[in-house]
Amino acid sequence: MQLLILVVAFFGLVSLANFAILRHDPALDKLLNLFLVGVNIPLFLLGLLLLFIQPGIPAQIGVELPLEDFRPIGVSLLVMSLWGIVVTLPEVRRFLGRLIPLDPDSPMHTLALMCSGYLVGNALLNLALGGLDSVAETATQQSLLDILLAQLLFVLVGVAGVGFLVRRDLYKTLARLGLERPTLRQLLGGLGWVLVLVVLQGLSGAIWRAVNPEQVALLEEINVRLLGEFDTVWEWLLLAALAALGEEILFRGALQPVLGLWATALLFAVAHVQYGATPATFFILIVGLVLGLIRRRSNTTVAIYVHFSYNFVLGLLVLAEPYLEQFAAG
């Protein structure tokens, strides 16, 4: 129920921002900015409260809570809320507009900045609460339905964010998201990028395994817990397709024209928080940069194609690994 309330509230904010853009009313823009400040003030106060709760105090007064130290959560909420308040200032957005291609006067771009800060803050919080070891302890099996719902949410956020049915019709929405028909040359070039990424994945994985085999084993354990029941080609095909569609429509289609190549790739890496602060996250950043360059030089459709092909090849390698080990042993 709480998640549903958050989703409804978010899409309400998206609708208000799109409506403000459609009306071109400066008074409405200011009202929306004030509303965003109002959204962040309770988060700031909650973070401040949690910051002053010393470890062990709840237990001393007979209150049982799942955590002993709430200060990391307090710091995270403070940082996220302060970011959410600061980006409502036009001067801040104009400064950021010199660094990334956002429109400082767009309410939707303001909302995108605020939510991007929330994503980063949530990822840093997860790392502060235990990093990769904590992820390994809490990781649960993902079903195709779980992944479908998550990626559908990504698609809806991207489509709603660019103003579908509010300030853009279907064709303009597809054009804004970069969903165009790819050419044969673009698809062949995409296959080259898939080969490059797979080779880099193999080389970086081998080096990482040689340097820190324990960390690699822990990450493999997390992947088994998350995706261990995906053991057929068709399941990996669907998994690769869903992840490619959802993530590319949101990150490369909707966000990259607002935040730019580097900031979007960083957000893309941050979104894969299950990898922790490891070389795997750095490699995800490289993948995000490659997909961003593909979006910039061609379109989002080709980025989806490359992302899907890369994920599917990795899935096939996972399925083939036991047979390859038997072949090597024999």
Image (cartoon, rainbow, N blue to C red):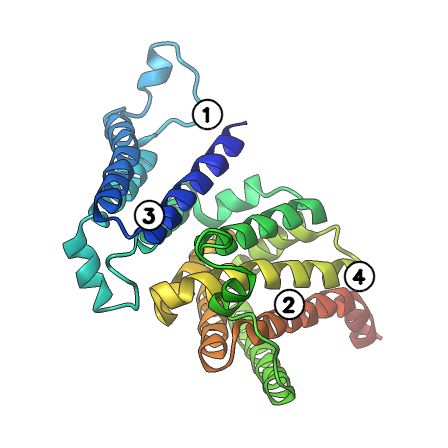
Q: Residues within 10 Å of mark 3 (few under 14, many from 20)?
A: many
**Mark toward the start of the polypeptide (4 vs 3):** 3
Residue 259 seen in render: yes
CA distance for labels 3 and 1: 42 Å
Q: Amino acid at mark 3?
A: Ala
Residue 278 seen in render: no
Residue that appears at 51% across and 81% down: 298
Checking the image for residue 126, the label placed there is: none
**Mark toward the start of the polypeptide (3 vs 1):** 3
Q: Residue 139: horizontal and vertical position, in percent?
A: 59, 43
Q: Residue 176: horizontal and vertical position, in percent?
A: 47, 67
Q: Residue 168: horizontal and vertical position, in percent?
A: 47, 59
Q: Amino acid at mark 1?
A: Pro
Residue that appears at 44% across and 73% down: 289
Check contact, mark 2 vs mark 4: CB within 8 A. no
Q: Nearer the viewer, mark 1 or mark 2?
A: 2
Quadrant of the drawing holding the N terminus: top right
Secondary structure found at label 1:
loop
**Mark toward the start of the polypeptide (1 vs 2):** 1
Secondary structure found at label 4:
helix
Secondary structure found at label 2:
helix
From the viewer's perspective, is residue 320 above or below residue 44? below
CA distance for labels 4 and 1: 39 Å
Residue at the spot of label 2: 311
From the viewer's perspective, is residue 229 above or below residue 168? above
Residue at the spot of label 3: 20
Checking the image for residue 66, the label placed there is: 1
User: For this rendering, which residue is in front, 195 or 133?
Assistant: 195
